[in-house]
């Protein structure tokens, strides 16, 4: 079979990253192999996101740039997948004459057939059919990168929560869970391929299995925990309303479950939470945080926030700031509220002016920066175990010159803190031992979003204090 080059651009969340890998996996048997060089590709796929207006604009500007590439290479197949494809469907074909295929979020497993039809007759196709159940449960194994230690597995798709601001239920369809046997099989296979850390994905993992009467999410975690060769489990995202006691207790007894939870709260004000249709209160949320910390005292907690939701008053925004001070998060993502098509909040009155939204975002981020700095500083001098992911691709922009200009490496703690460290030159020859191994790092410095440390124990090991290095057995 003649091999063909496939370039996939991905915008959006971890689920889209997983989907991109699945797309590569289903197209590989047709001879498509990945390329980073878009100009030489036979097919370009853009896997899109529409969570906020900016993400949608990004997708359209990427697609716009492809028109020029297609004009110099008319046989190029241009395909649009993901959430913008689902939302816009045929309108994309009408708007962009260089696009050949629009496939929605449930069409990934139909891609080989769709692409075959385009290859043979150069027709233009839209497939945005949504189904309430999972028609094809895989597993499909897309390519891993060299030395990849951490990967995703989607355990469920869709969302039934209908938060009033959110487009996801409209573009990902109804919530449906994969069978636990398929999930375990997929994780096992990835472990055999060298993966050490697995992140289980779903819009609301804590309701996993409930509709289909499969096992609970806590039970699924316990099954994954027993997989030999896997070292770490993470998951995202857990909706606060469904965070069960079983799941909280899992942090106390599952050996491989990392001590980190991403628990998006969105707002610290009960009135806003109600109008967002989040179905929990500030008090209920704080109680769950207290229980998590009682079961797992070193758990790190992160969250998502939306500022400038329609009708948000200064006092309500203050309540959000107050919640951040109360919880003292280890990190957070904050977003300016953005109107999305067909969602209820788009029709809510009292839209907040753009400058006010921006100012609130800056205030919130400044507050969290201070909290993160203090928390990071408190870690200086501590020794933490990290799973090494590989050489750092980028260095923090606020680098303070603590590191000498040697190769930097990066890993994560169980709490999801990113730590960079340097490897003594004499051991660079042994560097292949490092990726995928656990090493102990003495934390020596802090950046805004990560930490700097000294390697003190691992397959390559430097003894602290003496400047002396040894290779561990
Ligand atoms: N299922 C996850 C979130 C998925 S979307 C959950 O419920 O937590 C990721 C984040 O995007 C959300 O947590 C929210 O903070 C943000 N978001 C979603 N819709 C948005 C909108 N219309 N405007 C701004 N931010 C939004
Ligand atoms: Fe969107 Fe709410 Fe579903 Fe999360 S739980 S994906 S915010 S509707
Ligand atoms: Fe974006 Fe779709 Fe994910 S809208 S955040 S890619 S589910």
Image (cartoon, rainbow, N blue to C red):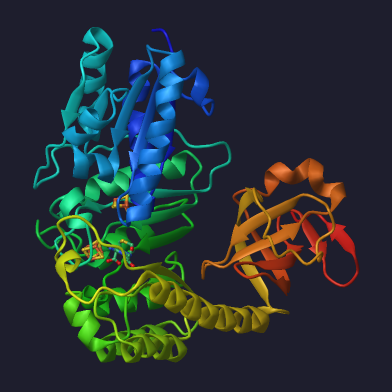
Q: Quadrant of ligand 2?
A: bottom left
Relative horizontal placement of residue 284, taking residue 420 as reference (left or right): left
Q: Quadrant of residue 320?
A: bottom left
Q: Quadrant of residue 469?
A: bottom right
Relative height, residue 415 to residue 318 (above, below): above
Numbered label tally = 0
Relative height, residue 47 to residue 328 (above, below): above
Residue 42: percent from left, percent from top = 42, 17
Relative height, residue 405 to residue 23 (above, below): below
Relative horizontal placement of residue 450, taking residue 171 as reference (left or right): right
Query: Which residue shows up at 39% across the image and 49% down it?
Result: 152
Query: Which residue shows up at 67% across the image and 69% down it?
Result: 447
Residue 78: percent from left, percent from top = 34, 24
Query: Which residue shows up at 31% across the image and 75% down it?
Result: 352
Figure quadrant of the C terminus: bottom right
Query: Which residue shows up at 13% across the image and 63% down it?
Result: 210
Residue nearer the viewer, 394 or 367 = 367
Residue 75: percent from left, percent from top = 37, 11
Residue nearer the viewer, 455 or 37 = 37
Q: In this view of the protein, can residue 336 be seen by the observer? A: yes
Q: Quadrant of residue 159?
A: bottom left
Residue 338: percent from left, percent from top = 30, 63
Q: In this view of the protein, can residue 330 be seen by the observer? A: no
Figure quadrant of the N terminus: top left
Relative height, residue 14 to residue 285 (above, below): above
Relative horizontal placement of residue 120, taking residue 176 as reference (left or right): right
């Amino acid at each position: 079979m003649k091999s063909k080059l496939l370039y996939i651009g991905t915008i959006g969340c971890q689920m889209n990253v997983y989907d991109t890998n699945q797309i590569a996996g289903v197209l590989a048997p047709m001879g498509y192999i990945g390329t980073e060089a878009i100009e030489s590709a036979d097919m370009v796929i853009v896997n899109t996101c529409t969570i906020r207006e900016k993400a949608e604009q990004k997708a359209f500007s990427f697609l716009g740039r492809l028109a020029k590439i297609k004009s110099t290479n008319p046989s190029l197949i241009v395909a649009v997948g993901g959430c913008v494809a689902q939302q816009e469907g045929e309108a994309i074909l009408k708007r962009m004459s260089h696009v050949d295929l629009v496939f929605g979020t449930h069409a990934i497993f139909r891609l080989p057939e769709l692409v075959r039809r385009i290859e043979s007759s150069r027709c233009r196709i839209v497939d945005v059919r949504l189904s309430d159940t999972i028609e094809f449960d895989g597993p499909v194994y897309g390519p891993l990168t060299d030395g990849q230690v951490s990967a995703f597995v989607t355990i469920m798709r869709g969302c039934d929560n209908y938060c009033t601001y959110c487009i996801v239920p409209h573009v990902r369809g109804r919530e449906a869970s994969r069978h636990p046997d398929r999930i375990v099989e997929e994780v096992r296979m990835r472990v055999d391929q060298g993966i050490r850390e697995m992140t289980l994905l779903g819009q609301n993992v804590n309701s996993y299995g409930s509709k289909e009467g499969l096992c609970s999410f806590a039970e699924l975690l316990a099954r994954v925990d027993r997989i030999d060769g896997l070292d770490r489990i993470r998951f995202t995202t857990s909706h606060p309303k469904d965070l069960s006691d079983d799941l909280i207790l899992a942090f106390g007894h599952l050996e491989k479950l990392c001590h980190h939870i991403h628990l998006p709260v969105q707002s610290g004000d009960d009135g806003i939470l109600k109008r967002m249709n989040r179905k929990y209160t500030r008090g209920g949320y704080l109680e769950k945080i207290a229980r998590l910390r009682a079961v797992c005292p070193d758990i790190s907690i992160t969250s998502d926030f939306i500022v400038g939701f329609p009708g948000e008053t200064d006092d309500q925004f203050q309540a959000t700031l107050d919640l951040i001070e109360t919880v003292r998060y280890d990190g957070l993502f904050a977003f300016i509220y953005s109107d999305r098509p067909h969602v209820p909040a788009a029709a809510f009155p009292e839209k907040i002016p753009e400058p006010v939204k921006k100012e609130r975002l800056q205030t919130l981020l400044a507050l969290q920066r201070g909290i993160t700095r203090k928390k990071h500083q408190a870690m200086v001098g501590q020794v933490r175990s990290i799973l090494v992911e590989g050489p750092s691709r980028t260095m923090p922009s606020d680098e303070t010159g603590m590191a000498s200009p040697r190769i930097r490496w990066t890993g994560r703690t169980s709490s999801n803190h990113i730590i960079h460290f340097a490897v003594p030159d004499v051991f660079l020859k042994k560097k292949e031992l490092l990726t995928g191994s656990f090493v102990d790092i003495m934390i020596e410095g802090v950046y805004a979003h990560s930490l700097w440390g000294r390697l003190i124990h691992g397959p390559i090991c430097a003894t602290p204090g003496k400047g002396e290095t040894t290779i561990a057995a």
